[in-house]
Amino acid sequence: MSEQPSNRSITIGAAQQGPVQGDASRADVIERLIVMLRQAAEAGCDLVVFTEVALVPFFPHWHITDVGALDAYFEQQMPGPQTQPLFDEAARLGVGFHLGFAELTTEDGEIRRYNSSILVSAEGRIIGKYRKIHLPGYDSYQPGQPFQNLEKLYFRVGDLGFPTWRAFGGVVGMMICNDRRWPESYRMLALRGAELIVMGYNTPVHNPANPSSDHLAGFHNHLSLAAGAYQNAAWVVAVAKAGIEEGVEQIGGTCIVAPTGQIVAQATTLEDELVVARCDLDLTQRLRQATLNFSAHRRIEHYELIARRTGFGTPDGEDED
Ligand code: ING
């Protein structure tokens, strides 16, 4: 018998974004996002997922030494005057959304910068915020590279953990870009009940740290997402900032992945492109009662090694001589 969608199905729009060039204003970008928001409303979407650092070019690709120039890429209010139109249009259309942005805040008397994302309800209210934990790249300029990845220099490691929220008829969590390459990110969210995990990513084709894998950039993207979805029986929605942005070629591959690990919808361009799928949140529960029944099959008491190892270890056994 074919799976009958439950009444907990929601329609999700993954709003892939083409490049944001240096001369684009936030108003220009917000207008592009509103166009996709309207397309999503037309398609009956309950939730639209925008990408990581959606409002500006992915500035960690450059070495910026002037603090004023750096801070121009950050949002000091969310929503602020320039982003409020997105919140207003979403509320008018009755569509919730996820948005990635560079967050500048003053906490405990000091200025702090994060790579952040928010989940916003269909009424335009911020449900929750996440701050990126796995910051790839370097904390100092890397000479001789065609572009940089200075997230460790510009952002603090996220201090909010991996929270989840009851929203859109289910339990929703967020991660950002490099987080998706670490299985712990999905597991932490699943242990907190996440049935839907949403994220954005800015992923160059070329990885200066490991150029021999450049041809696998797209494969590793979908592999990470499908594995995370399947091994945690969660829906995963991942949205690219795609195309050649200020000279850096970034992968597309925006997709919606079912808890079975199947990619049920994906982008075919490297531009602004809305990808839509109907997602049955109860499918997560059916899988979590079967293959992924943690209490029946998972043996956490045997996993203490994970807690002790900080890196790839050496064999426990004696060397065969
Ligand atoms: N970008 C990349 C990502 O994790 C990267 C950095 C690329 C790491 C390729 C490893 C390999 O998709 C961000 N912004 O995290």
Image: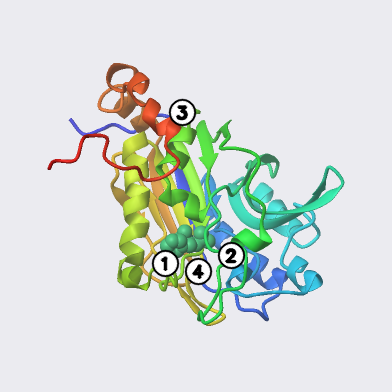
**In the displayed structure, would residue 18 be above or below residue 311?**
below
Which tag is nearer the camera, tag 2 or tag 1?
Answer: 1
- State the SS at label 2: helix
Label 4, label 3: how many angstroms apart (C-alpha)?
33 Å
Label 4, label 2: how many angstroms apart (C-alpha)?
9 Å
- Tell me whether the residue at label 3 lies in contact with that at label 1, contact meaning CB atoms closer than 8 angstroms: no
Label 4, label 1: how many angstroms apart (C-alpha)?
10 Å
Label 3, label 1: how many angstroms apart (C-alpha)?
29 Å
- Tell me whether the residue at label 4 lies in contact with that at label 2, contact meaning CB atoms closer than 8 angstroms: yes
Q: Residues within 10 Å of mark 1 (few under 14, many from 20)?
A: many
Nearer to the camera, 162 or 45: 162
Residue 132 is at least partly visible in this image: yes
The answer to which of marks 3 and 2 sits earlier in the sequence is 2
Residue type (three-letter) at the residue carrying disc 4: Asp
- State the SS at label 1: loop
Residue type (three-letter) at the residue carrying disc 1: Gly
Q: Residues within 10 Å of mark 2 (few under 14, many from 20)?
A: few
Mark 3 = which residue?
Answer: 191
Residue type (three-letter) at the residue carrying disc 3: Leu
Q: Quadrant of the C terminus?
A: top left
Mark 4 = which residue?
Answer: 272
Label 3, label 2: how many angstroms apart (C-alpha)?
36 Å
